[in-house]
Image: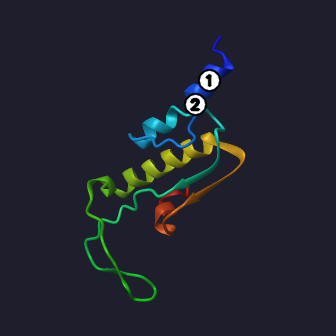
Amino acid sequence: MESNLFLQMTFNFKDKLINGDSLEELKKIPDETFDLIFADPPYNLQLKNELTRPDRSKVSAVDDKWDQFDSFKKYDDFTFNWLSECKRILKKDGAIWVIGSYHIFSGLVR
């Protein structure tokens, strides 16, 4: 049986940055670890045509590899998976803040 001290040392995430595949790294975190999750996920803004906001300002496309998905389904699956992991590691009375807009979640209605 592992000691509580070992578990505290192993799962001490205070003041730490974890660099890696988010889905793989999230799976390593024990259930109900965090009080707050702040996420700024990929937006999947691979625009083929011009897109404007309600105020008519232009939305710039993102062409970085980390924001590229083969299809809307793959993006929606990725979003569903990371949100599911966040729900698992969030304490029952915790909160999650996600940067983005409605398009991040529009394909998640299941």
Which residue is the site of mark 1? Answer: 7
**In this rendering, position of residue 36 left or right of residue 66:** right
Q: Quadrant of the N terminus?
A: top right
Could you tell me residue 84's position as x and y percent?
56, 45
At label 2, counting other C-alpha atoms closer than 10 Å, the crowd grade (few under 14, some 14-19, many 20 or more) is: few
Q: Nearer the viewer, residue 6 or 86?
A: 6
Q: Residue at x 58, y 33 (%)?
A: 12
Which residue is the site of mark 2? Answer: 11
Q: Nearer the viewer, residue 44 or 18?
A: 18
Could you tell me residue 94's position as x and y percent?
69, 50
Q: Residue at x 60, y 32 (%)?
A: 30
Could you tell me residue 15's position as x and y percent?
54, 43
Vertical position of residue 54 compared to residue 2: above or below? below
Tell me the number on the disc at residue 100.
none
Vertical position of residue 60 compared to residue 2: above or below? below
Q: Residue at x 39, y 54 (%)?
A: 75
Which secondary structure lies at badge 2? Answer: loop
Say if mark 1 contacts mark 2, CB within 8 Å: yes
Q: Residue at x 50, y 41 (%)?
A: 16
Q: Quadrant of the C terminus?
A: bottom right
